[in-house]
Image (cartoon, grey):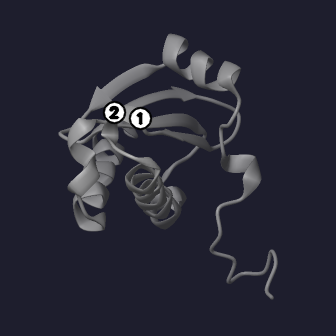
Amino acid sequence: MNRGGPLEQGLPKEEILKKRKDFRRVLEHGKSWQSEHLRFFYKKANQRQVGFAVPKRLGKAVQRNRVKRLLREVYRMHRHAIESWQILVIAKDGARGVGLREIEREFVKFLDTNQKR
């Protein structure tokens, strides 16, 4: 198993927002941006971190977990383009049936629109 080498493609634990207070801080003090299927809250920070939220109204656990998996994968593929930001990504109701390419398109649009500020 390759840990920490140049081929490491996982999502490091240090980059994940998990605590309720961290989510709340980004929600209260950050800016927001939304697309058709995703809502983003973001703010400048000392390090790059991301949190994912999928509401229960999106469906049963299987559907919610699939959406979270897609969100994590898209973030992992594009995290090199993110500097020192804390980003909270919340799936909207229509995100359940959406595929990887659509989520990626919306994520890239968010990065293009907001990273230049």
Give the structural element (helix, strand or loop) at label 1. helix
Give the label on residue 44, or none.
none
Contact between marks 1 and 2 (CB within 8 A): the answer is: yes
Q: Is residue 30 shown left or right of residue 90?
A: right
Q: Which residue is mark 2?
A: 57
Q: Amino acid at mark 2?
A: Arg
| Left or right of residue 30: residue 104 | left
Q: Kindly indicate the quadrant of the structure image that contains residue 91.
A: top left
Q: Say left or right for 22 vs 104.
A: right
Q: Quadrant of the C terminus?
A: top left
Q: Can you give x and y, in whole percent of width and height, for residue 77 in the image?
A: 47, 67
Q: Is residue 103 above or below residue 24?
A: below
Q: Establish if 7 lies above or below 88.
A: below
Q: Amino acid at mark 1?
A: Lys
Q: Position of residue 61 (x, y in %)?
A: 46, 49
Disc 1 to disc 2, how far (Cα)? 4 Å
Q: In the rendered image, which quarter contains the N terminus?
A: bottom right
Q: Is residue 117 visible?
A: no
Image point (30%, 65%), residue name:
100
State the SS at label 2: helix
Q: In terms of depth relative to the viewer, which is nearer, 95 or 33? A: 95
Residue that appears at 26% across and 31% down = 34
Query: Badge 1 local density, few (<14 within 10 Å), some, or many (20+)?
Result: few
* Residue sitting farthest toward the bottom: 1
Residue at label 1? 56
Q: Can residue 62 be seen in the rendering of this structure?
A: yes
